[in-house]
Image (cartoon, rainbow, N blue to C red):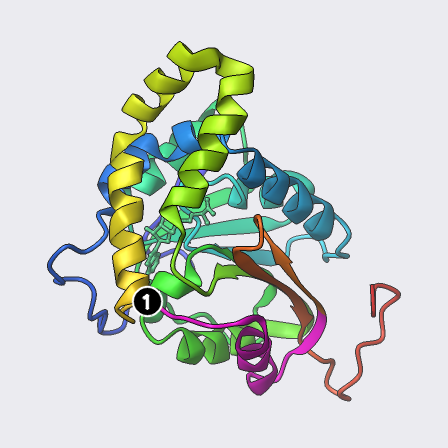
């Protein structure tokens, strides 16, 4: 695993309007509690499973560049790297706390095809056609001008390149999630263990409140499944799969960049 700010990309101007926003989500503080919650959230673990099965079904040329955007603590980017050990996976996230957590995990599991890039998504400039697959899980909504970004990432994909995007399009229902997490953990941890978990995860709960506020007041991207799919179609991608996942809270989409002749011609088409 290596950490390199400039290995594949150069910076352009940072135009993120959320950078200085009052009550902005503090991803760095969230990072300390993120995996605590992720480990004890069965829906998140199911999503990792679905993601892994999907990316494993992809044919990826040896040595190809794969990107996970808004990759956080690396729970998805590292599955991507393990699923395609002959590829080079670029984990991109703007937050140093999230990247530090990802770096520790990659080092302790001995991942060698994994590089962390600490950068704002909007300022990354990869070569057109240089990426064989790109994933973005629960991060697009928080990025400025997500629809412009979708056009840019579509440009980075090579003909036949894969894309997997998962995103919540509506404000999180914090009450429903709390009830779900308490009920699932009461079964496995008991009342004392569950109370301890909630105490340790209080920073995650605080940051989720801020996320919900940013979703409710329109700072973060709101979409339904149709608008989500259309954003990728407008960017020239062929949508192969579209679903609702994560207890009905997130839109899921698998797409491909058409080959030069406009056809998707591999056996994976239409699955
Ligand atoms: C909810 S977390 C999701 C992390 C990971 N994909 C997962 O599902 O576990 C959102 C991540 O997006 C990152 N992020 C938010 N805005 C970003 C931006 N403009 N550029 C790059 N990363 C960003 C945050 O730092 C955070 O790690």
Q: Residue furthest right?
A: 267
Locate residue 175 relative to residue 236 in the image: left or right. Answer: left
User: Residue 190, how many percent across, how many down?
Assistant: 48, 12
Q: Residues within 10 Å of mark 1 (few under 14, many from 20)?
A: many
User: Residue 100, how many percent across, how many down?
Assistant: 32, 36
* Residue 236, magenta (yes or no): yes
User: Residue 252, how many percent across, how many down?
Assistant: 61, 61
Return the residue at label 1: 220
Front residue of 261 and 25: 25
* Residue 148, magenta (yes or no): no
Locate residue 178 relative to residue 110 in the image: left or right. Answer: left
Residue numbers of the magenta segment: 221-240
Front residue of 104 and 10: 104
Locate residue 264 relative to residue 102 in the image: left or right. Answer: right
Locate residue 220 relative to residue 19 in the image: left or right. Answer: right
Residue displayed at 59% across by 77% down = 226
Secondary element at tag 1 = loop
User: Residue 44, how many percent across, how many down?
Assistant: 54, 40
Q: Quadrant of residue 130?
A: bottom right
**Residue 167 in view:** yes
Up/down of 228 relative to 37, above or below: below
The answer to whether the beta carbon of the residue marked 1 is less than 8 Å from any atom of ligand 1 is: no
Residue displayed at 26% across by 45% down = 207
Quadrant in which the C terminus appears: bottom right
Up/down of 4 relative to 132, above or below: above
**Residue 38 in view:** no
Q: How many marks?
A: 1
Residue displayed at 88% across by 65% down = 267
Up/down of 123 relative to 210, above or below: below
Residue displayed at 42% across by 13% down = 191
């Amino acid at each position: 695993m290596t950490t390199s700010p400039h290995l594949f990309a150069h910076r352009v101007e940072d135009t993120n309007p959320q950078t200085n926003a009052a009550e902005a989500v503090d991803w760095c503080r969230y990072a300390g509690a993120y995996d605590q919650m992720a480990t004890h959230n069965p829906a998140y673990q199911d999503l990792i499973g679905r993601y892994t099965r999907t990316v494993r079904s992809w044919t990826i040329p040896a040595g190809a560049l794969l990107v996970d955007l808004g990759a956080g603590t690396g729970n998805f980017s590292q599955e991507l790297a393990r699923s395609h050990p002959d590829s080079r996976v670029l984990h991109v996230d703007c937050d140093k706390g999230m990247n530090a957590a990802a770096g520790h995990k990659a080092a302790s599991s001995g991942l060698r095809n994994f590089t962390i890039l600490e950068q704002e998504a909007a300022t990354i400039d990869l070569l057109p056609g240089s990426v064989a697959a790109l994933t973005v899980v629960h991060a697009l909504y928080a990025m400025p001008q997500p629809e412009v970004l979708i056009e840019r990432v579509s440009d980075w994909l090579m003909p036949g390149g894969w894309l997997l995007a998962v995103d919540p399009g509506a404000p999180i229902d914090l009450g429903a999630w709390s009830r779900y997490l308490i009920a699932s953990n009461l079964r496995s941890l008991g009342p004392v263990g569950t109370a301890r978990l909630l105490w340790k995860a209080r920073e995650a709960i605080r940051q989720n409140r801020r996320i919900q506020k940013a979703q409710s007041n329109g700072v973060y991207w709101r979409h339904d499944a149709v608008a989500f799919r259309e954003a990728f179609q407008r960017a020239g991608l062929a949508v192969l799969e579209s679903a609702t996942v994560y207890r009905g809270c997130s839109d899921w989409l698998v797409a491909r960049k058409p080959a030069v002749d406009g056809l998707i011609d591999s056996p994976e088409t239409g699955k």
